Structure formats: structure tokens, C-alpha cells
Amino acid sequence: MLLHLDASARRAASFSRKLSAVYADTWRASNPGRPYVYRDLAAQPVPHIGEAWTELCDYILEHEITDISRYQEAVRTPAQRQAWSVVQPLLDEVVAADVILIGTPMYNYSIPSALKAWLDQITFPKMSLEGRSFVVTGARGGAYGPGTPREPYDHEERYLRDFFRGHFRVSDVTFIHAELVNSRLDPALAHLREQHEQSLSAALKEATR
Ligand SMILES: Cc1cc2nc3c(=O)[nH]c(=O)nc-3n(C[C@H](O)[C@H](O)[C@H](O)COP(=O)(O)O)c2cc1C
């Protein structure tokens, strides 16, 4: 199954959505009949975790529950049942997925809070998603590639890569970025427009491949 998430606050003008759509269309064309689930984290935001969620998490840690199918044993109160009713469908989608595709912008050197809220809801201690792969199609206003002055400021790819590998134990992670998107708007970056166009067309090609 392909689980496709988008997190940009932009709709039609979003580059991360365009890239994730191209990837999803290609995947679906090459995997006819295989399930596909779409979730728009910006249009239908996942709530932030609350106190009852932390109680579920604490119970799972304390009782050394590592099997995701046993997490619901942690539900003991009405508030926890309510918290679990948010987690369960999100987690079911992740567990069922072979590929988790995330279209996300860089916001303030990191990921949008809409994506972080989803990540917080579905993440529990010592949890493994081994056997799955993550594909992140991203868009950012600047350039953060190797050797660029802003390379150390990229807390988007680094954070997601570290998190997927370190916490979920998934190393099959692919990042496809369209960079320098701000050159389309910011007169001070107009001279980088050509570089942006190249980055965008390489990203679209890679998403199709
Ligand atoms: C709230 C906000 C914060 C942003 N922060 C950054 C940033 O830290 N670095 C950057 O390069 N671009 C930043 N940008 C520019 C976006 O990454 C860029 O517009 C990108 O294309 C957004 O993805 P989208 O086209 O899918 O909406 C920011 C844009 C917004 C709206």
C-alpha cells in the first residue's frame, strides 16, 4: 500500500504537493490494483497530542510493549479511549503501508507543524517500522545542498532522516527536493531562477522515475 501525505499550507501553488502527486501517480500506474491512501495534513489537521496520549505512551514504555498491535492494552480511561480513537486510524495506515510518501515544505528550517503533529501522534517508544520505505518530496525557498552556505541550517531532511533511521529503524529513505523556490518571488534571488528551474525539473524527473 502507498500512504500519501501532504503537509503544505499552499494548495494549487505548492511544489511539494506537485512532486508528491507525480510520485503517487507513477507508483499507482506501476502498481495497478494495490491500495492507495491519501491524507492531507494541512486541510484536515491531526490534533496535537494531549495528556491522555502521554498516558498511553507512558504505559507502553513502562510495560515494554513493542508490538504495535498490543498498544490498545494501554487504554484504561474514557480520555485515553478518546486519544486512542485519534491514534488508531493513523497508525493502522502506517502499519499497512509499504511506502510512506510525504510531500512537505521546509518551514523555518524544519518541517511544518502539521507534519510534526502527525509524527507525534503515531510515534511510540522503541517502535519499529522495519520493512517499509519513506519517500519525502520537499520544496524549499533556498538551497541547502552539500557545500552551500545554508547546508548546516537544513533541519528538515536531517531531522526526518535521523528520525526514520534512529527511531523507526527504516533506512530506505529517499529525499527529492525542489530548491530555490523563493527565486520566483524575491527580486533579490531573481538571478537564481535558472538554478531553481533546473532543481525543479530534476526533482520532477526523479519523482517520475
Ligand atoms: C511559514 C514558512 C516558512 C518558510 N521557511 C523557510 C525556510 O526556513 N527556508 C527556506 O528555504 N524556505 C522557507 N520557506 C519557503 C518554502 O519552503 C517554499 O515556499 C516552498 O516552496 C514551500 O513548499 P510548497 O511549495 O509545497 O508550499 C518558508 C515558507 C513559509 C510559508
Image (cartoon, helix red, strand yellow):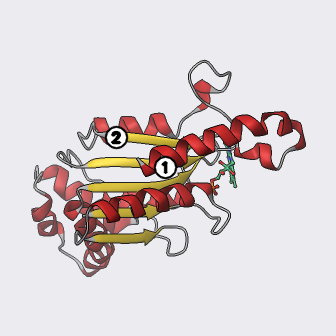
Q: Is residue 109 left or right of residue 93?
A: right
Asked which quadrant contains residue 49, the reply is: bottom left
**Residue 127 to residue 179: above or below:** below
Report the label total.
2
Q: Which residue is at a point 53% across and 36% down the rendered structure image?
A: 155
From the top left corner, tell me how far across and down residue 18 is, in percent: 56, 60
Q: Which residue is at a point 48% across and 59% down the rendered structure image?
A: 22
Question: Between residues 94 and 99, which one lies in front from this camera angle?
Answer: 99
Taking the image as drawn, is residue 116 in sight? no
Q: Is residue 50 left or right of residue 168?
A: right
Instruction: Determine crowd level at label 2: few under 14, some 14-19, many 20+ residues with C-alpha closer than 10 A.
Output: some
**Residue 112 to residue 11: above or below:** above
The numbered dot on residue 137 is: 1
From the top left corner, tell me how far across and down residue 69 is, in percent: 11, 64
- Upstream in sequence: badge 1 or badge 2: 1
Question: Between residues 21 and 148, which one lies in front from this camera angle?
Answer: 21
The type of residue carrying mark 2 is Val
Asked which quadrant contains residue 80, the reply is: bottom left
Q: Which residue is at a point 18% across and 50% down the rendered structure image?
A: 61
From the top left corner, tell me how far across and down residue 57 is, in percent: 25, 57
The residue singled out by tag 2 in the image is: 173
Q: Is residue 184 left or right of residue 138?
A: right
Q: Residue farthest to the top? A: 147
Q: Which residue is at a point 11% across and 49% down the rendered structure image?
A: 64
The residue carrying mark 2 has its beta carbon less than 8 Å from ligand 1: no
Taking the image as drawn, is residue 71 in sight? yes
Q: Is residue 60 left or right of residue 39?
A: left
CA separation in Å, label 1 and label 2 = 11 Å
